[in-house]
């Protein structure tokens, strides 16, 4: 990976500093709090699983927040122009996923779960890359290189190997390979962050570089269950922060209405998640209902893959209208 010389820190819009500071803070909070939950649950509550489940439900709120794009007039018009992507693609994913469970039973369930895990971690990495790119733009850092993007994608692969191994089978080589990949990505990213700090890059860009590279370390540091919760919570909180700022844009309509709809969408999908994943309620249908929720989550992946594609003119302009302080070049 070629390293591009970076200029000394120059003035950054205070609004950008506040926004990036918020994103960085919510990214780090799970590292400091989530690992304590199993201990605190054992000490103060009947079940650690219940405590972790509650946090998982809270995390899912961000998935529902995707529905906000349908009430923003800019994105609604864009969605109407791409019906195949926003409606047909999710429908096909749903048919294939539910069909696999219905036809193949447990084997189909394991396959869909593993594929969703791989897509999930890829989705996490795409969000980190987008935030890192916005951080570079807002702080006047050089444009990111494709080789750095592939570095973080390798981290997603390493995380996937560990989670797939822990979910469905005991293949030690997957776990070991994942550990090596995630550790290598972490070391390279931290080295890059240190270099950026030494040449005077803005601290927000330095920290985001480190976070992107270390993102999947908790999967191995804390174990798959707690580690997945740390990673998922960091991703969810990032998304909630960005979507809240987007919804709060008064120039696009009533702030109260927009934020209320954003929260309502989030709570609605979190409620569906809680019901669909309460396995005692569904008996032999539990796997099917679990995958039904995963289809909602994969719809979220599909929508986000378009609306956050900031190299496209519409997506970039829409975000620029709501957060102009992130686009200084």
Image (cartoon, helix red, strand yellow):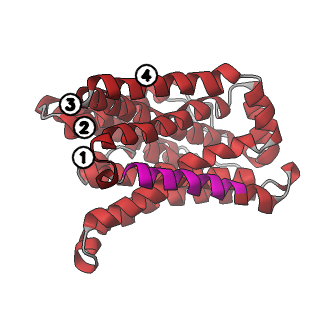
Circles 2, 1 touching at the beta carbon (< 8 Å): yes
Res. 96 mark:
4
Picture quadrant where residue 150 is located: top left
The numbered mark, 1 or 4, whose residue comes first in the sequence reads: 4
Under tag 4, what secondary structure?
Answer: helix
Q: Which residues are magenta?
A: 261-277
Kindly tell me whether residue 11 is visible in this rendering: no
Under tag 3, what secondary structure?
Answer: helix
Residue 174 image offset from top left, x and y in percent: 19, 30
Circles 3, 4 touching at the beta carbon (< 8 Å): no
Res. 220 mark:
1
Residue 174 relative to residue 5: left or right: left
Q: Which SS does the magenta portion mostly show? A: helix
Q: Cα distance, mark 1 to mark 3?
A: 12 Å
The numbered mark, 2 or 1, whose residue comes first in the sequence reads: 2
Q: Residue furthest bottom?
A: 44
Q: Cα distance, mark 2 to mark 3?
A: 8 Å
In this view, 110 is above or below 57: above
The numbered mark, 2 or 3, whose residue comes first in the sequence reads: 2
Picture quadrant where residue 153 is located: top left
């Amino acid at each position: 990976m070629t390293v591009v010389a970076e200029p000394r820190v120059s003035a950054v819009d205070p609004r950008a500093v506040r926004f990036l500071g918020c994103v960085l803070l919510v990214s780090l909070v799970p590292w400091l709090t989530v690992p304590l939950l199993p201990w605190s649950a054992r000490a103060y509550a009947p079940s650690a699983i219940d405590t972790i489940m509650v946090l998982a439900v809270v995390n899912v709120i961000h998935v529902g927040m995707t529905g906000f794009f349908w009430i923003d007039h800019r994105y609604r018009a864009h969605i109407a122009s791409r019906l195949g992507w926003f409606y047909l693609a999710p429908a096909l994913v749903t048919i294939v996923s539910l069909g696999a469970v219905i036809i193949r039973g447990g084997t189909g369930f394991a396959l869909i779960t593993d594929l969703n895990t791989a897509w999930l971690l890829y989705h996490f990495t795409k969000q980190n890359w987008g935030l890192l790119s916005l951080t570079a733009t807002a702080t006047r850092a050089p444009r990111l290189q494709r080789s750095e993007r592939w570095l973080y994608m390798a981290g997603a692969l390493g995380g996937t190997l560990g989670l797939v191994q822990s979910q469905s089978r005991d293949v030690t080589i997957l776990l070991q390979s994942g550990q090596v990949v995630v550790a290598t990505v972490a070391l390279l990213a931290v080295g890059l962050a240190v270099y950026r700090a030494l040449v005077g890059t803005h601290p927000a860009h330095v920290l985001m570089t480190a976070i992107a590279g270390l993102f999947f370390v908790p999967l191995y540091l804390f174990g798959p269950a707690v580690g997945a919760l740390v990673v998922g919570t960091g991703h969810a909180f990032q998304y909630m922060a960005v979507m809240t700022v987007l919804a709060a844009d008064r120039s696009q309509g009533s702030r109260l209405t927009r934020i209320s709809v954003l929260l309502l969408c989030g709570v609605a999908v979190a409620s569906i998640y809680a019901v669909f994943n309460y396995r005692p309620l569904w008996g032999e249908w539990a796997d099917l209902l679990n995958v039904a929720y995963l289809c909602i989550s994969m719809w979220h992946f599909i929508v986000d893959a378009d609306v956050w594609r900031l190299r496209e003119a519409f997506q970039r302009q829409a975000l620029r209208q709501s957060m102009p302080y992130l686009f200084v070049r």
